[in-house]
Image: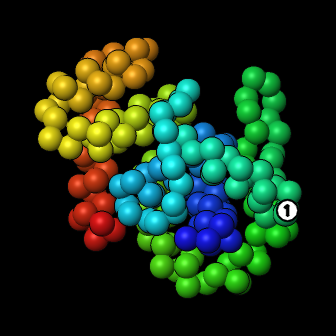
Amino acid sequence: MTEARQAAIVAELVRQLRDHGSWAGETHVQKTAYFLQEMLDVPLGFEFQLYKFGPFAFQLRDLLGQMRSLRQLRLEPQPAPYGPKLTLDDGAPQLRTRFPKTVRTYDPHVSFVAEEIGKYGVGTLERLATALMVKLELPDGDASARAALLHSYKPHVSVTDALDALSQVDAIRDKARAASII
């Protein structure tokens, strides 16, 4: 997928996250984009790796910076100790105009992720996205092996919380299947 099409999907993701009451900070965009790509098969083409708060794509961080410089996104400062929210800027509508088919094709996926995952705080997003990463790394692993791996990646996440996150990821996947998103 071209960078311009990636930007169109990311702008739509930010819009829908905000519409669904999400904080829509960079961590929210990173984790929801991870679910879009890895669970819902939206071909964004980002290379995610395990990082401080779970799966993270440096290319996505760079794209967000480029979108800000092109005035497609802007940061909305928040009072301390909170980080900024992302919001659409004046250049965002041209992405929908230039790539209506791309936006329309992936709108059900973006809407699903914004509604189902965007509502969570950073800690929950970290657990859920890392749980999805673990499920993809251990496709044949049982729940205890997956929970142990998640805990080894994120020692502050208890095995009990890891099991819960893995179960939540299964429920999200089941809901996506029921909605014919995947």
Answer whether residue 161 is visible to the viewer in this image. no
- Dot 1 amino acid type: Arg
Q: Residue at x 64, y 81 (%)?
A: 99
Of residues 130 and 87, the one drawn nearer to the viewer in this rendering: 130
Question: Circle 1 — which element?
Answer: loop
Relative vertical location of residue 83 with respect to residue 179 in this rendering, above or below? above
Residue positioned 65% across, 67% down in the render: 3
x and y, in percent, of residue 40 in the image: 37, 61
The front one of 37 and 25 is 37
Location of residue 56 by image quarter: top right
Q: Is residue 27 left or right of residue 148?
A: right
Left or right position of 150 against 122: left
- Please provide percent x and percent y for residue 9: 59, 67
Image quadrant holding the N terminus, namely bottom right
Q: Nearer the viewer, residue 49 or 165?
A: 49
Q: Tell whether 117 sits left or right of 4.
A: left
Question: Looking at the picture, how far across and down is residue 58, in whole percent?
Answer: 63, 44
* Residue shown at 64% from the left, 57% from the top: 14
Q: Position of residue 87 (x, y in %)?
A: 74, 55
Quarter the C terminus occupies = bottom left
Decide: is 175 above or below 141.
below
Colour setup of the view: rainbow
Quadrant for residue 145, please give it.
Answer: top left
Q: Which residue is mark 1?
A: 71
Residue depicted at x 23% and y 29%: 146
Judge whether 44 appears above or below 124 on screen: below
Q: Is residue 174 above or below residue 78?
A: below
Question: Is residue 137 something that shows in the picture?
Answer: yes
Decide if residue 25 is on the left or right side of residue 181. Answer: right
Q: How many numbered marks appear?
A: 1
